[in-house]
Amino acid sequence: MINQLRGKGVFGDAVLDAMAKVPRHLFLETALDYMAYEDKALPIKCGQTISQPSTVAFQSELLDAKPDMKVLEVGTGSGYQTAVLCAMGLRVFTIERQKELFDISKARLSALRYRAKCFLGDGYAGLPEYSPFDRIIITCGAPEVPQALLDQLKTGGVMVIPVGGTRQEMTRIEKRGPAPSDLLIQHFGDCTFVPMVKKLAYRAL
């Protein structure tokens, strides 16, 4: 898998070292184990997906994060991206709106000794009580950049977010000051993520 990532242009040692340490097969349903290290997005519970390794690596590399930085992840999902961020030495706060996924990923991350702080909540709202964050990563497609998340990003901080509708554009935002004109916005090509949805999800009884 690591050789595949290098072939796709991911060269950062910190990211590749972290991904080499995280056992992706433990974040999948057992029936999909045999595809764990292929560069494919795979289904998980609640109609969600675990991103393909190259996407996880690419987003992680765009963060340009240094050990001990405080990172907010929106969309815990399976917990795989969370684990990679933890393996990079980051202090991870992760939020998931689906209760079933939250319960599974929190227990999984704890069992594997990844010390992320997990929250059930609305990703659009973020975690203002724990802000500001050095980095924010969104692992679902947002129709626009949520202002609440920008407000929780430290000056000098970086957000990586897929922005758009059915297809999104991978977007990196550097917050250089308090005004909208201080944002440095860069685009890194098309991508496809499950949509970012407001509010908590509730299963019908």
Image (spheres, rainbow, N blue to C red):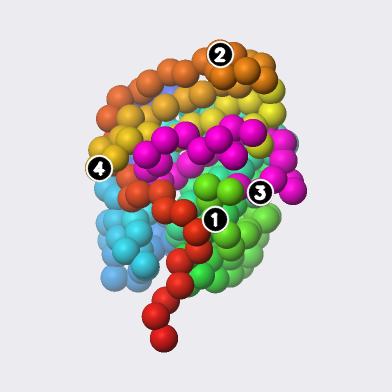
Q: Identify the residue under disc 3.
A: 127
48 sits to left or right of 166: right
Neighbor class of circle 3 (other Cα within 10 Å; few <14, some 14-19, many 20+) is many
Q: Identify the residue under disc 2.
A: 181
- Which amino acid type is shown beneath numbered disc 3? Leu
C-alpha distance separating marks 2 and 1: 27 Å
Mark sitting on residue 56: none
Q: Earlier in the sequence, mark 4 or mark 2?
A: 4
Q: Quadrant of the N terminus?
A: top left
Rendering coords of residue 57 (x, y %): 43, 36
- Which amino acid type is shown beneath numbered disc 4? Thr
C-alpha distance separating marks 4 and 2: 28 Å
- Which amino acid type is shown beneath numbered disc 1? Asp
C-alpha distance separating marks 1 and 3: 9 Å
What segment carries the magenta color? 126-151
Q: Tell me the residue at 37%/68% (across/down).
A: 45
Is disc 1 in contact with disc 4, using a CB cutoff of under 8 Å?
Answer: no
Q: Tell me the residue at 33%/30% (across/down).
A: 169
